Image (spheres, rainbow, N blue to C red):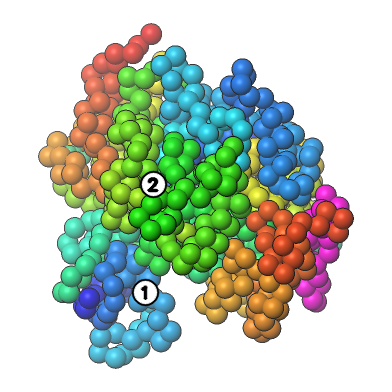
Amino acid sequence: MKLKVTVKRQKDPQSPPYEQSFLYQGEGATVAGIIRKINQRENLTDINGEPAEKIGWECGCMLRKCGACAMIINGRPSLACSQYIEADGELFLAPLSKFPVVRDLIVDREHIFKSLYKAALWLDENMGYDEEHHAARFSSSNCIMCGCCLEVCPEFSLGEDNYSGAVLPVNSYRIADREEEPQHLKQISKQYQKAFFSGCGQSLSCNKICPCNLPVEELIVKSNAINVWKRRKNKK
Amino acid sequence: MNNRFIIIGAGLAGLSAALTCAKNGDSVILVSDGYSERSQSVMAEGGINGAIDTQNDSPEAHFQDTLFSSCGLVKEEAIHALTQAAPIIIKELARMGVNFNTEQNGKLSLRPFGGQKNRRTAFAGTSSGKQILTAINDEVRKYEIKGLIIRKPHHLFRDILIDKGVCTGAIIFDKYSQKEELLYANGVITASGGLNGLFKDFTGSVANTGYCTALLFARGVKLSNLEMIQYHPTTAENNGKRMLVSEAARGEGGRLFVYKGNEKYYFMEEKYPELKNLMPRDVTAREIYNISKEMNCEVFLDMTELDEAVFEKKLKSLREDCIKYLSVDPKDSPIPVFPGIHYFMGGIAVDTAHRTSLKGLYAAGECCSQYHGANRLGGNSLLGAVYGGKVAASTACEDNLPLIQDGERLKEDLPFEAAEDIKDVLQTAMGVIRNEESLSAALEKIKENDIFSLLAKAVLQSALERRESRGAHFRSDYPERNDDKFKKVSVASFDETVNIRFEGV
Ligand SMILES: Cc1cc2nc3c(=O)[nH]c(=O)nc-3n(C[C@H](O)[C@H](O)[C@H](O)COP(=O)(O)OP(=O)(O)OC[C@H]3O[C@@H](n4cnc5c(N)ncnc54)[C@H](O)[C@@H]3O)c2cc1C
Ligand code: SF4
Ligand code: SF4
Ligand code: FES
């Protein structure tokens, strides 16, 4: 396979972005596999033979489990370790655009983590086990905080309002479904309405993008039902 | 109360330690390369061990299996405490909200795992690590909001501060802003994971570079059992590293075979009629390695006979990974597998209370050498990480060392990662089967004296000097176990040169 890999690069947060291309020749691989191969070259040169710095990116598991490697791949947000490239052609890589760039493909996603603790997502008193909602709670616990759903969300930007995007409803469900302490539940619900419900335009662009195939729409509907409409079937 | 601790690593061990300190009213600076969600702990699939089933199992039986598998290289006191605590820890995790699989009656489901006679592995599908981490992380948030736990994500540990033989703090480096920060504390707990970064190919996270262990070793902290590296029997190539096919596959009924002509030969079942495909990992890995060399053939893992329902309820993500990364649906065809580096039983030497050889420094989780000896049982490391984190933190709180705002650091320029040639050398010499010649030759090739080279030497020398075969360490030139000489822990220390000594457990 012969591939022209173009990367939108940036030396540091202050420098202007630029594009640089590399030639990749080898077997079909995931985007993560391709970046690793390029970075392993001893003296890295770009497509014009000019010396180049290693491509800055984050990765961990190489298996869609850690969320580190999210980026924009041919115009679409995804995980580098989940996209296979098997045919000749061009590959265009850019950092997620909704977060501040640290370097090259690395962005600072602190906002995601902050929004979860502001939302008071922990259990004070666990209601205990029930089979009925197990699958949905399991999905809610499997969010890898990659940020792909925020990239496509028309309402999300790192502005003043601190809108959370779909990450909050996805993660809120496992807590809202089990929390038994009424005061805490109220606190969760209040913050939820402020940080998510009042801002969500319900366009559902976030639904199909999740690289972990989480049922994002279902979790939004379920979290809304508890946090906004106060409908919780399993109330004791 | 009111002490401050630095914890390096925010995987399960680091989080568990942080919770323990915070519950004690102490504050924590939690330093990690990535957020907890990015740590290797989220990759754990199969589950966590504990004698929950009081009718058919007991902590005593768990203790015996762990001891047996360790080949005598663990402190009995430590694994006794571990196995006693296990059922309590699992119940605590369930209370925190871990979505364990359960039976009709609400009791936790348990799956059989390699090297264990009873069912005692609690699990959450094949995402056990992620599900456990999410729940602990939710719990940690309670203390983050109170300001008791302060996270320093995207920070690398660089060095410790030592004042008159006591560890007084650490130097950390923000990967994002490229700034260094100096922190003092009443104790430092390292929970920095395994030594993946010393090798080319492994199942774990590429973020675990082994830097912390390398640095600490260079600073005089003792390491032990470095030669004990677990090869997981069933892994496959995935984009330049190994992908695990979890033991859960065999726990749920998967079988290993090779083709003899057109016939499937189930070699493990033939050779080991009792535990069959669930022999301990060291044995299974060697059997796969040997049969593939002898017969010059591929070894397959056959899951085609498992029910659709088993895949759906218990092995969902495992199946998805195989389809995505190996282009094989395990329901339709067997998967070619081969052993790959998976876990480091050895690491930072600790006493039963998780103190290292340096006062004020504690270690927990995969970076330390505590509960697994010469061979780890699947499901015991999540347990060891959660429990070890607790013990290390409790000890640090009890030791109650004074805050000393002074200390020396190393003056040299420190690398961030091991050089590629070190990885090549170790990958080859520290294979499933080792011998004097290749280990000595490998040692010759390590010429530098940077922290990674020192650690590499320590690993090779430990393997060289253990002239016997025990657990994960197999020497073709010394194929027998030699209890007289080697029922001992190998201890590596650095003081101008790398030294290995064998000490009583
Ligand atoms: C694919 C796979 C499946 C597994 N399945 C199971 C299983 O089913 N059951 C089981 O019991 N065990 C399993 N294990 C083993 C188990 O997952 C690990 O042993 C365990 O999670 C280790 O936890 P830890 O907290 O010690 O380290 P990790 O989770 O590896 O965390 C290490 C932390 O240290 C940080 N760190 C590392 N270096 C630095 C540095 N220089 N500076 C700052 N921070 C640093 C990292 O960012 C991370 O936060 C599996 C392992 C793998 C790879
Ligand atoms: S539904 Fe639309 S507005 Fe709401 S979180 Fe999803 S993408 Fe954003
Ligand atoms: S919901 Fe999906 S896309 Fe959004 S952060 Fe979680 S894993 Fe990523
Ligand atoms: S490297 Fe972990 S999700 Fe891609």
Q: How many neighbours does mark 2 have within 10 angstroms: few (below 14), some (14-19), or many (20 or more)? A: many
Majority SS type along the magenta span: strand
Q: Chain of mark 2?
A: B
* Residue identifier under label 1: A37
Amino acid type shown at disc 1? Lys
Q: Which mark is residue A50?
A: none
Q: Is residue A154 above or below residue B419?
A: above
Look at the image and give the residue range highlighted in magenta: B486-505
- Mark 2: secondary structure: strand
> Can residue B355 be seen from the camera position used here?
no
Q: Residue A80: give x, y in percent of width and height.
A: 30, 61
Amino acid type shown at disc 2? Asp
Q: Residue A166: give x, y in percent of width and height.
A: 26, 39
Marks 1/2: CA distance? 32 Å
Residue at mark 1 shares a chain with residue at mark 2: no
Q: Is residue B116 left or right of residue B259?
A: right
* Residue identifier under label 2: B302
